[in-house]
Structures are given as C-alpha cells and as structure tokens.
Amino acid sequence: MARSTVRTEITGKVWKVTASAGQSLAEDDPIVILESMKMEIPVPAPVACKVIEVLVAEGDAVTEGDVIAHIEG
C-alpha cells in the first residue's frame, strides 16, 4: 500500500475533525470539515484508505495546499 498526503484545496478554519489515526475510510468519506466564508466544506479521502495521522485539530487555521493528513491506501 502506498502512503500519501491529503491537502486542503481552500483557506479556512478546521470546524470538525471526523477521522482519526487507524480509522479505515471509503473513498470520499470526510477526514475533516472546514469552515470558509460561513460554508462547511468537507475534505474527503481521495481513495479507500487507512488514516495514518491527522495533522490538524478543530479550530486550526489552514491555507490552500496545507497537508492535513497522512493516509495509506
């Protein structure tokens, strides 16, 4: 299995972390939900995978391109 990173596509604030290390996710399951311009935007798993590490916490500010998680799958 290949390890990869998940990056944000927008600038915003981490509203909710929905995945944790060791969790298995299906493709498109949310890893975190960002808040930007009063909208909730999920950051999904790009493929079916296992979460290795989530690098952000609720309330953290992120910018476009920030790595938010490491996955394997």
Image (spheres, rainbow, N blue to C red):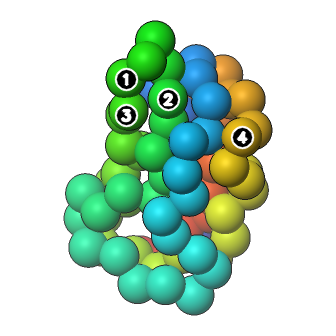
Q: Position of residue 65 (x, y in %)?
A: 60, 27
Q: Find residue 7 and report its image quarter.
A: top right
- Reading the image, the residue beneath label 1 is 39
Which mark, by number, is residue 73?
A: none
- Reading the image, the residue beneath label 3 is 41
Pointer 4 with pointer 1, Cβ within 8 A? no
What's the CA distance linking mark 3 and mark 1?
Answer: 6 Å
Which of the two discs, 3 and 4, sits closer to the camera?
4
Residue for point 62% across, 30% down: 13
Residue for point 43% across, 18% down: 38
Q: Earlier in the sequence, mark 3 or mark 2?
A: 2
What's the CA distance linking mark 4 and mark 1?
Answer: 15 Å
> Quadrant location of the C terminus?
bottom left
Pointer 2 with pointer 1, Cβ within 8 A? yes
Say what secondary structure mark 2 lies in.
Answer: strand
Query: Would residue 1 be seen by someone viewing this image from the given angle?
Result: no
Residue for point 40% across, 84% down: 24
Disc 4 marks a residue whose amino acid type is: Gly
Q: Is residue 22 above or below residue 46?
A: below
Say what secondary structure mark 4 lies in.
Answer: loop
Pointer 3 with pointer 2, Cβ within 8 A? yes
- Reading the image, the residue beneath label 4 is 59
- Reading the image, the residue beneath label 2 is 35
What's the CA distance linking mark 4 and mark 2?
Answer: 10 Å
Tell me if 57 is positioned left or right of 37 in this view: right
Q: Earlier in the sequence, mark 3 or mark 4?
A: 3
Disc 1 marks a residue whose amino acid type is: Met
